[in-house]
Image: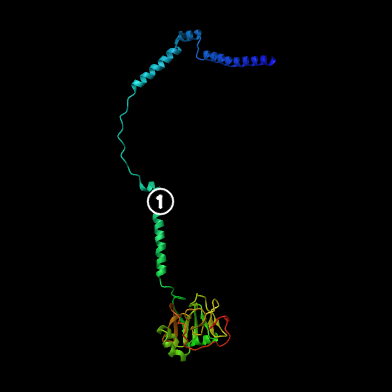
Amino acid sequence: MTLLIIGIIALAVLALVPLIVVMRGRDRDAAIGTISRETAKRDTAKVFDDDGEELVSGKKYEKAIVAARKQESTDLVLAEAAPPAPYIPPDPEQLGVTRRMFFNRGIIAMFGLGLSGFGAACIGMLWPSGVSGFGSKINAGLISDLKAEIGASNGFLYRADGRMWLTEYPAGAIEKARAVYTTPELNGMNAGVVALFQKCPHLGCRVPECVTSQWFECPCHGSQYNRVGEKRGGPAPRGMDRFAMSVTDKGELVVDTGSIIQGPPIGTNTTGQEAEGPNCISESSH
């Protein structure tokens, strides 16, 4: 019973709250914009200052302002439309470089650099390989001096500037050599010297000398060659490749390291040289 009474009272209070809010809103609306009769009478009545001159009332003042505005609107004169100004192109010096000009010049510059690099690469590829060192004609020196150096180097003289071995070719083997070798090779052989390319014709390893056997013996796969580069054993498909040679009027040997001649075929043995001591590559057969 008590709870029922409390609920009824709560509902009554909740119903009174919106009613009070609406009533206060109506009072506020009635208060805004409402002028009392006394105020309205004073606004329309004539008012005089201390000197007896009539003062302008609020309504008369407003009417005067409205009339002045209407008069000003009628006094307005529309100006004639001015002709369009002639087009004057901008000065390029003041305009500077536009974005389009910048991108166009950048693209042209990149194309130019690319073509220049390609052209330089083509010229470099077609240019004769070297004016000195490997790939060029090397003056190795006097034949007599070379033979002395070969003897002092245990029969094998290495020249790093031409990536070549210089060894002595025996004079007694020239007749056999003429049946196997070409004229550019025989030019040096007739003078008693042969110039061999340092690479093994099997897989390109650098072939060292073996002082004990007096042969060339490749440490990579066991190919063996006699002192003048003719194959004596191993998997190599031919003898050591060699360079074209010539002898000057002064007796100097000129080796053309840009002209590599394939080594003699398997079975060529113009010197008949056998191993003169233990082989450095013992597992190789020959």
Residue at figure coordinates x 41%, y 69% from the top left: 125
Q: Is residue 88 left or right of residue 208?
A: left
Residue pushed farthest right?
A: 2
Identify which residue, 264 or 66, lies in the foreground: 264
Answer few, some or many: residues within 10 Å of disc 1's Cα (few below 14, many 20 plus, some between 14 and 19).
few
Q: Position of residue 37 (x, y in %)?
A: 49, 7
Q: Is residue 133 left or right of residue 213?
A: left
Q: Position of residue 163 (x, y in %)?
A: 49, 77
The amino acid marked with disc number 1 is Phe
Q: Position of residue 244 (x, y in %)?
A: 43, 81
Quadrant where the N terminus is found in the figure? top right
Q: Which residue is mark 1?
A: 103
* Residue 273 against residue 78 in the figure, above or below: below
* Residue 97 against residue 137 in the figure, above or below: above
Q: Is residue 17 left or right of residue 81?
A: right
Identify which residue, 158 or 18, lies in the foreground: 18
* Residue 42 against residue 237 in the figure, above or below: above
Q: Is residue 119 visible?
A: yes
Q: Is residue 142 visible?
A: no
Q: Quadrant of residue 220?
A: bottom right
Q: Position of residue 70 (x, y in %)?
A: 37, 19
Colour approach in the figure? rainbow
Residue at figure coordinates x 38%, y 46% from the top left: 95
Identify which residue, 68 or 3, lies in the foreground: 3
Residue pushed farthest front?
A: 1
Describe the element under mark 1 as helix, strand or loop. helix
Residue at figure coordinates x 39%, y 59% from the top left: 112
